[in-house]
């Protein structure tokens, strides 16, 4: 394989996209990103369930 097939600007955009997915993994469940989710799953990735990102922590950790 010779050289990277992406321009410097495309790599910057890809890095930004990956950072966004790391910060908010629920993005991977967006219908427009289904192709990327399918790719990740085909590579053996384990994705977090979508519902785990919709719940807000209560903040109350004091036992009842």
Image (cartoon, rainbow, N blue to C red):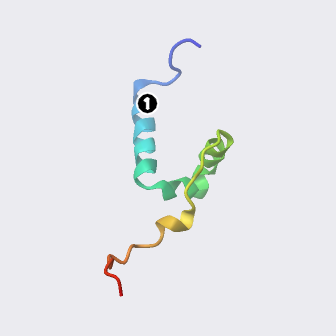
The vertical placement of 32 against 13, above or below, is below
The quarter of the displayed image where residue 42 is located: top right
Give me the residue at 48% from left, 54% from top.
25
Depth order, front residue of 61/12: 61
Residue 48 lies, in percent from the top left, at 55, 57
Q: Residue furthest top?
A: 2
Q: How many marks?
A: 1
Depth order, front residue of 23/3: 23
Which type of secondary structure does the marked residue at label 1 adopt? helix
Give me the residue at 40% from left, 44% from top.
19
The quarter of the displayed image where residue 58 is located: bottom left
For label 1, count other residues whose C-alpha is less than 10 Å away and answer few (under 14), some (14-19) or many (20+).
few
Residue 39 lies, in percent from the top left, at 64, 41
Give me the residue at 45% from left, 37% from top.
14
Q: Is residue 11 left or right of residue 41?
A: left
Residue that carries the numbered disc 1 in the rendered image: 11
The vertical placement of 14 against 24, above or below, is above
The vertical placement of 42 against 58, above or below, is above
**Quarter containing the C terminus:** bottom left
Depth order, front residue of 44/35: 44
Residue 54 lies, in percent from the top left, at 48, 69
Q: Residue furthest front?
A: 63
Q: Is residue 28 left or right of residue 41?
A: left
Q: Is residue 13 left or right of residue 41?
A: left
Q: Residue furthest right?
A: 42
Residue 1 lies, in percent from the top left, at 59, 13
């Amino acid at each position: 394989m010779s050289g990277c097939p992406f321009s410097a600007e495309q790599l910057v955009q890809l890095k930004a996209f990956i950072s966004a997915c790391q910060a908010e993994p629920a993005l991977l469940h967006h219908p427009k990103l289904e192709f990327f989710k399918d790719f990740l799953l085909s590579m053996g990735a384990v994705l977090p369930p979508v519902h785990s990102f919709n719940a807000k922590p209560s903040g109350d950790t004091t036992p009842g």
